[in-house]
Image (cartoon, coloured by chain):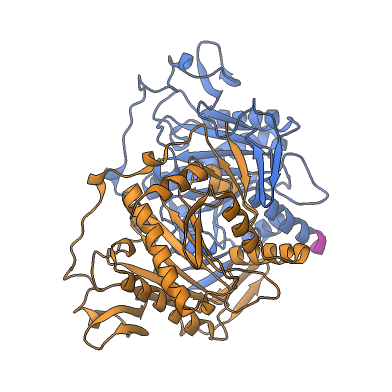
Chain colours: A orange, B blue
Amino acid sequence: MSELRHNAISGEWVVIATERAKRPEDFAKAEKERSVNPEYSKACPFCPGNEALSPEETFRIGGEKKWTVRVIPNKFPALFPKEILARKDDGLLHSITGYGIHEVIIENPRHNAFLPLMTDEEAKNIILAYKNRYVSLRNNEDIKAVIIFKNHGPLAGTSLEHPHSQVVATPIIPPQMENRMIKAAHYSNETGRCIFCQMMEEELMKKERIVLETDDFVAFEPYASAAPFQTWIFPRRHASSFADITENEMGDLALCLKTVLSKIYYGLGDPDLNYVINSVLFDDKKMKTMHWHISIVPRITQPAGFEIGSGIFINTSLPEKAAEFLRQVKV
Amino acid sequence: MSELRHNAISGEWVVIATERAKRPEDFAKAEKERSVNPEYSKACPFCPGNEALSPEETFRIGGEKKWTVRVIPNKFPALFPKEILARKDDGLLHSITGYGIHEVIIENPRHNAFLPLMTDEEAKNIILAYKNRYVSLRNNEDIKAVIIFKNHGPLAGTSLEHPHSQVVATPIIPPQMENRMIKAAHYSNETGRCIFCQMMEEELMKKERIVLETDDFVAFEPYASAAPFQTWIFPRRHASSFADITENEMGDLALCLKTVLSKIYYGLGDPDLNYVINSVLFDDKKMKTMHWHISIVPRITQPAGFEIGSGIFINTSLPEKAAEFLRQVKV
């Protein structure tokens, strides 16, 4: 049979199709399908030596000669910092000029690097760059949200091999975030509690969906996972904004994110995936409208007409089994 | 530059990335990439002669020996009619047993048929089957929504070549539909008007996004199209439920849908696509919380981390250019 499960944070429902459910190992790509990239590619604009091909850096970790992380404006941005922010209304049609900031975070000099293959220090440098860009971009008065995300592999929307993340700063609060803020504020009004803290507490008691616990973070498969091996990483300490992550937490997050991605990488044969940091710009402890977190979504299955037409996703993997599988992958 | 556009019906925003915009013809697949399927496949469970392989029919058009459309229960359903509807609550975790109905509409006996390649009568038979299933399934008291959709091609979520649509009847109102009902009811409260009727009227006045006008339907590219060549088909007559489509409207819808899909098929080289009928179960003229319609989404681009993390889609095609291109495709 199957089951409809409710996502208390988004209000969405998913169908967990246990009848059609595959065993976790059935989602793994065959060894031979994995692509092998070189450590250096002469033609790659992100490889060391080609720095002059890209727009001027906005942030760098490392010395003048040798860098470990670089941040540059996106050469093909979705939004533009030079655009003048303006709104236009015409009947039902509302638009805003494409004002915003779109940067690329080059995660590592090595062309074939990926978090699971990096040292702990290299991993931490990526988190440092995420925080730097988040804190820097949120201070712009016309920016309402900063979205940090990574596309890994063509099914996840990237064709560039060199490991990179992206940052987009938008002049609106994305409706998905607005929806979650409203739901969390409602829960906080009703109960006095943060819905994310509450969920984490329940998951830690139940244990069956936990993937990894570190000092400061908890990684688990959401009860209503929209896709096989979707994984959430919550900070244990209640904090609305990623901007407030501490030095210690950054090291621990690097370790947690690297370990979870390694379990997916080795356990499932390096599937394409996205991850994104969900956060509000500034602390909002009193209202408890948000608790920042990371969502990892492997792109193993393809949404079809039912998902597009209803917003209800069909997941052919049981989150409890996925968590058990990932717990057991040794990295 | 680029532009953020607001979808008045869903409340969502899209980025129209005109800087990166491709010309409409750049989205077309090369002729050689089109797959050519045989008219009959011995191994296909949906081909004539193999009827015994499938579960018992729930609807048929055509005589006992020769059918033109057949509807059967899905052999691998997402939801199950024999399941007892029950809810379970445990802290933040809410679930519903997987009760529901999941059918397959075999659109045509020919293995390689597709609406653009069918006669007008064959096209109308598909609409007749859609209506029959919609009206039949909505009467079940535990069913809250009936979703009719089609997946065309692997990128749209199907691996079965034989032309088929699907119907899923769910025990909940999908959150996407709930959201639109709330938005439309709000607009109706504020203005006394249906937001869909208002949008259609504005689009007919502006003309630039219209793809096709028939007696009873208007096909147009939404101002805030989430994907290149997304197309909406609205009935001119205000009606909440697809169940109330008249005999004449069915013939006209068959013509309209076939023509629009033909323009996409010939103009863009048969891209994979989904379409879905958005409707509420019963008429609701007074509240004006819905106006049924069809949404067609070619699967030409791949959503990435930004889309997944924000709900804001980036569309690299200008809807006005896409409409102009489709208007000019002769079929």
Q: What stretch is highlighted in magenta?
A: B189-193
Q: Can residue B307 be seen in this view?
A: yes
Q: Which residue is at 51% across, 61% downward?
A: A218
Q: Residue B224, image x and y in percent? A: 56, 62
Q: Quarter of the image for the C terminus of chain B: give it.
A: top left
Residue B190 inside the magenta-drawn segment: yes
- Is residue A34 rendered to the left or right of residue A253? left
Q: Residue B59, image x and y in percent? A: 60, 21
Q: In this view, does B133 lie above or below A229?
A: above
Q: Which residue is at 60% across, 45% downward?
A: B214
Q: Residue A105, image x and y in percent? A: 36, 74
Residue A48, located in which quarter of the rendered image? Answer: bottom left
Q: Which residue is at 35% across, 22% downward?
A: B41
Q: Can residue B18 be seen in this view?
A: no
Q: Residue B15, image x and y in percent? A: 50, 68
Q: What predominant SS class does the magenta segment belong to? A: helix
Seen from the viewer's position, the closer of residues A219 and A9 is: A219
Residue B158 inside the magenta-drawn segment: no
Residue B1, located in which quarter of the rendered image? Answer: bottom left
Q: How many marks?
A: 0
Seen from the viewer's position, the closer of residues A176 and A298 is: A298
Seen from the viewer's position, the closer of residues A40 and B52 is: A40
Q: Is residue B168 above or below residue B204?
A: above
Residue with the most extreme top position: B65
Residue with the most extreme left position: A42
Q: Which residue is at 79% across, 45% downward?
A: B284
Q: Is residue B67 above or below residue A115?
A: above
Residue with the most extreme bottom position: A64
Q: Is residue B204 above or below residue B263?
A: below
